[in-house]
Image (cartoon, rainbow, N blue to C red):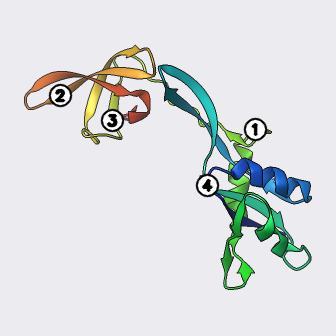
Amino acid sequence: MAWCAVNTLPHQERRAELNLRRQDVSVFLPRLWRTRRHARKVDQVLEPLFPGYLFVHLNVAVSPWRMIDNTYGVRALVKLGDRPAYVPEDFIEGLRADADADGALRFPEPEINPGDKVRLIRGAFRGCVATVVRLTRHERVELLLSMLGGEVLAVAARNQVAPAG
């Protein structure tokens, strides 16, 4: 038995997962909760961790793996030559260990409080260290950046900062 990657049609990971399960194929679709903002609404949606891909557990010597390419929602089983390409077992098991029954992964966000030193990890000021002034609504963080011999007040999305430790 080995884990193999399956390339799905655009935005059809769930359809491919459902149809593969109907064929008694063991499927793992790792997903993440993401914040979606649209039309002044903010909600949480479950999206694939690897858009366009899911994983199947197969015994290549026995399983009729060629039928996977003809499954609704699937583009193709990822292959090396004419054989399925294997995904390392420890990689998949590590993901499965962090996933709930729906395949949703939850990575705990480090706690950030006013007064903490943080490093910007995205955006124009990536790499800069700042002090958290306050946490605002809508997953925003108000920061005090030290630059050019002075301090500048800035606002960043929560996912743009990490503890500076």
> Which percent across, then down, holds residue 104?
70, 39
> Looking at the image, is mark 4 or mark 3 earlier in the sequence?
4
At horizontal 72% and vertical 62% (from top left) the residue drawn is 74
Report how far apart the C-alphas of labels 4 and 3 lie in the structure.
Answer: 35 Å
Position of the N terminus, as image quadrant, is: bottom right
State the residue position of label 2.
Answer: 146
Report how far apart the C-alphas of labels 1 and 3 lie in the structure.
Answer: 30 Å
Q: Nearer the viewer, mark 1 or mark 2?
A: 1
> Looking at the image, is mark 4 or mark 2 earlier in the sequence?
4
> Which percent across, then down, holds residue 67?
84, 71
State the residue position of label 4.
Answer: 10
> Looking at the image, is mark 1 or mark 2 earlier in the sequence?
1
What amino acid is found at the position of numbered circle 3 in the picture?
Arg
Q: Residues within 10 Å of mark 1 (few under 14, many from 20)?
A: few
Q: Residue 100's mark?
A: 1
Secondary-structure class at tag 2: strand
Report how far apart the C-alphas of labels 1 and 2 lie in the structure.
Answer: 41 Å
> Which percent across, then down, holds residue 54?
70, 57
> Which percent across, then down, holds residue 117?
33, 27
